[in-house]
Structures are given as C-alpha cells and as structure tokens.
Amino acid sequence: MSTIYCIIDGMTDPSFRTEDYPTLSSMRLDKYLETTPEGYEPESLTCILRLLGVRDIPKKMRGYVEALGANIPVHPDDLILRGSWFSLDGAGRCVAPVKAPKKWELPAGVFYYRLEDYKSLLVLRQHADEIDQLVTTPPYASTGQPAERFRPSGSSTLEELYEMALHKKKCMILWGESVPSRIAPFPERAAVICGTNIVRGIAKLLQMDLLHVKGATGDVDTDLYTKTQETLMAAKRYPFVLLHINGADEAAHRRDEKEKKAFLQKIDAEVLPALLQSGHRILLASDHTSNPINGQHERDRQPLFIGGCKRGSDESING
C-alpha cells in the first residue's frame, strides 16, 4: 500500500463548498493546514513545498525551479526570473494573461524562453549578485492595475527589458527573481505526475522521480483519465506518489467561476473515485486559495482530506 497525495492547485475559494462534490464529501476532513509561511506570498512553489513537509524554504527560488522543470540550462552565477505576459487596455492597465511571444531578440547575455501560455523565463548571465537589490511585484493582483506598478527596480538591465516588452496592448511582468539553490531531498522514494513546469521543477529539486504522462497539461484540458491511471500504476512501484492537478487555478486567474467549478466537478467524478477504490491511502489538499472573482491567490488555511486505507498514523506529511 502506498500514499497518493493529490494536490488540486487553487481548489478553494470563498464560494467553495465540500458538499458540491459528492466524492470529496465522502472523504474525511482531517484538519486545516497553514500552507503559506509568514513572510511569503501564497503561491504554488512555497505552498506545495510546505504540503510536502519542507520547512526551510529559500525565499528567492521561483524562477530557478521553473527553469529546472523546463530543462533550461543555468549557471551558478545566473539570475533567473519569470516573465508573465498580460494584455493592456487603452489606459495601460492589465486586463488578462496573453500568450507569450515565441521569440524575443535581447541584449547579449540575456536569454528568453517561452513556457506555456502566458509564461516565460529570462536568464541573465553573471547577474546573480544583483538579486538582493531587486524589487519586483508578482502579478497575482494585476487585473485592473496599471502596468507601471509592476516596473522592476534595482537593475538597469531589468528596467531596460521591461521597457522593451512594454507595448500599447501588452506588457511583461518580471518577478520570481532567483539564483540556483538546493534543499534537502524528499525523505522517501517518490514519483510525481503533473503538467506544470513549477511542479516538475519541485520534483527535480527534491530528487523525486518525474514521470512523463502524455496529455498532461497545466490547464483544464489536461488528460485526467491518463493522469489517474499513471498515478495508480506508479503507486504499485513507489511508496509515495504526488498527483498535481492545476486547471482550477488557471480558471480562477481567468476569473471564470463556472469553468473552475465545472473542472473541480470533473475531478470529483473522474479522478477521486478511482483513487479511493485503489486500496491506497489518499491525501487531498489545495495549495492555496484562488479566487475567481478577482483572479488572485489568497492566504487561507487549506483543508486536508483523507480517504482510502490507513497507513499507521493519519498525520499528514505537512504535520
């Protein structure tokens, strides 16, 4: 018997009710978890690491972990940042995420990588020593805000890149500044099934085995059936399996409450029954709240649900 930890990214929000999801309602609500440490923003990297039991989390590692997940080469003295692209209205205010350009001509020593959808990464060679003087603003509360609010400071190179990306109809928000770093590996042999670069990066950071699943994406179009079957297959070989499902968070960022709820109901009908009938111990949690009314992450304690067979104590990894 193995433990399967299903993390539904951004599952909760102010209107979330367990009783709207019949299979989830059959699981036992064990406790509420503090997934966002004091002094950190509620975001997937930090919250998922907390759910996996990591306590000593470096504050500036977001871009680096995404680079790991996307197999982007970095060096010890590199500065790595996330670039999130947003459309702008006529007054220069952020409206919604927009697809990142495939290519971008940049100065020598600066490398641009397009990830999925609106996401990109920038790698600045030999700029790691600038990290402590940088000031950036994550895009979680960007809707309706002027693009100027997200102008980086502390680096003339980053300020130049911000200007280069700023157009009448779109901008790039630079954030998640980081340098290569390490944390202790996960304490047991584990497999990870996911469709997002950040979770792929977490798997590599914690030295967990990342399993490729055809059709796994980071949005509501992910192949839930295949992800579930691969999770159950992995549970036969690994004592711990992390199944990460991300689409609800993206629907919330699009401020689409109906899409988010419909996707959660699909998970409840297609994923959870198979997990609970597998004979394995099932843990289920959300990493953070994602509010589809304002499109933002919010700091809330998250419910931990337990189902399936017990393995010793019902204490979660998070504790």
Image: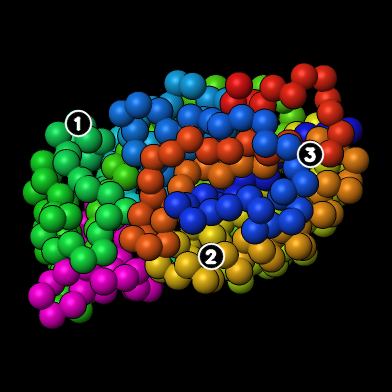
* Secondary structure under the numbered disc 3 in the rendered image: strand
Q: Nearer the viewer, residue 94 or 181?
A: 94
In the picture of the structure, the residue carrying the numbered disc 2 is 260
Q: Which mark is residue 236?
A: none
- The answer to whether one can see residue 194 in this image is no
- The residue that appears at 63% across and 36% down in the rendered structure is 304
| Amino acid at circle 1 | Asp
How far apart marks 2 and 1 lie (CA) works out to: 37 Å
Q: Are marks 2 and 1 in contact (CB under 8 Å)?
A: no
Query: Rounded to the nearest whole Å, what is the CA distance between mark 3 and mark 2?
Result: 23 Å
CA gap between label 3 and label 1 equals: 44 Å
Q: Report the side of 26 relative to 220 (left or right).
A: right
Q: In screen coordinates, is 290 left or right of 153?
A: right
Which residue is located at x 26 percent, y 71 percent?
Answer: 95
For badge 3, the amino acid type reads Gly
Residue under label 1, please give it.
132
Q: Residue at x 53, y 65 (%)?
A: 260
Crowding at dot 1, Cα within 10 Å, few <14 / some 14-19 / many 20+, comes out as: few
Q: Quadrant of residue 174?
A: bottom left
